[in-house]
Image (tube, rainbow, N blue to C red):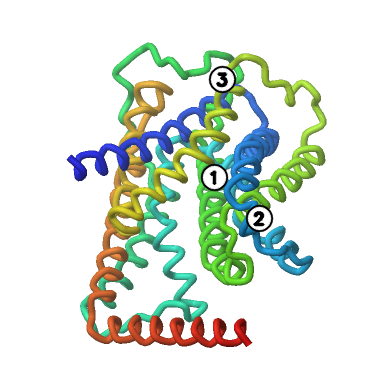
Amino acid sequence: MFEEKTYVVVILIQTIYAGMVLLTKATFDGGMNSYIFAFYRQVAGTVVLIPLAIIFERKNATPLSVITFCKIFMLAFMGITLPLNASSIALAYTTATLGAAIVNCLPVATFFLALLFRMEKVKIRTTHGIVKVAGVVVCMAGVATLAFYEGPHLKPFLHHHPLEYHDTQKHHQSHLSSSHKRWAIGCLLFLVSTVAWSSWLVLQAQVLRSYPAKLRFTSLQCLSSSVQCFVLAVALERDPSQWKLGWNIRLLTVVYCGTLITSLSYYLQAWVIQKKGPVFQAMSQPLTLIITMIGSVLLLGEAITLGSVLGGILLVISLYAVLWGKSKEEQTPENHDNLANKAEKEFAEQEEEEVITKL
């Protein structure tokens, strides 16, 4: 029963993320400005997170220094503001399927950056080391396939699509999005978003050492990115009508992203990682691509290209290759010894701190 519950939660998490991609794409097709959308999304997330941080971390809150806040502010720009705006523009230029496929690059890109920063090591002479390097190469091949190969189209077999936006502007955007120039720009922006997000995952671990209050840390990042997104939106969009939400899909998408993504999905992911480990959660990521691909055909009426399918398959293979190599590396006796020595060192440092405190 417990195993079944875990699988249901994992499917629910990936369905929530697929819904975010589909709703966001439908919102952009409807004409909403991507910079304004990013601002509203972060404001919604901030409104949800700040009360939770105050309630759950009011007693054991870590003092916030000016230097730490500046680091958090810069991390928010690198890990939230930049990737969110870049991926939003890229999604408007391309398709929901590509947006879901490119997410599979994140673990591979994070591993590659951690390797550059010497936070990860690869032993080329071992099987798991070769597989991890091959995963990075396959990931690059997948990105190149998505960017430069289109292939034949798989046209929708249904004529009615609930999230399709019927308007001359929509047809104009569809015509433009089919151009190779806009597609290439969208792929490049997705790549920028992935690299920035990966860098954020690598660098924030260092900041969390000095400020371990995770909920307040996340809330401060959301608040900082809200300010940054607001400045960016005001500078690049001068039409006041673009800021109106109303009772439409725009408001639905903002609320959806601010509540289900920022709060519920993060909680469910933490629960799955606690029960089954981070590898299990990461290996479920391709479900988002599958659900989004089906939803983009049935709900948005998008035509899936052979290049998107092949590129998505390569990205999934690269994801599993790196995760497999990482899991095998953690099972080696040498790694177990390193973990044991690290645990002993941390325990000794903790005892030393307790003695100093008593004195």
Nearest the camera: 253 or 131? 253
User: Whole-Å distance between the Cαs marked 3 and 2?
Assistant: 27 Å
Q: Give the residue number, with chain letter if any, for mark 1.
A: 186
Residues under labels 3 and 1: Cα distance?
Answer: 23 Å
N-terminal label among 3 and 2: 2
The disc labelled 1 sits on which kind of residue? Answer: Gly
Position of the N terminus by quadrant = top left
Residue 34 in view: no
**Residue receiving disc 2:** 76
User: Along the horizontal axis of the image, is 131 left or right of 177?
Assistant: left
Give 334 or 267, whichever is nearer the viewer.
267
The span from disc 1 to disc 2 (Cα, nearest Å) is 22 Å
Residue 181 percent location from the top left of the image: 55, 43
Please, is residue 346 above or below residue 136 in the view?
below
What x and y, as percent, mark residue 266?
47, 45
Around disc 2, counting alpha carbons within 10 Å, would you say few (fewer than 14), some (14 to 19), or many (20 or more)?
many
Q: Is residue 9 visible?
A: yes
Which residue is located at x 19 percent, y 45 percent?
3
* Residue at the spot 27% in from the left edge and 86% down from the top edge: 334
Secondary structure type for disc 3: helix
Which residue ends up furthest to the front in the rendered image? Answer: 358
Residue appearing at x 45%, y 63% in the figure = 109
Identify which amino acid the numbered label 2 is placed on.
Ala
Which residue matches tag 3? 249
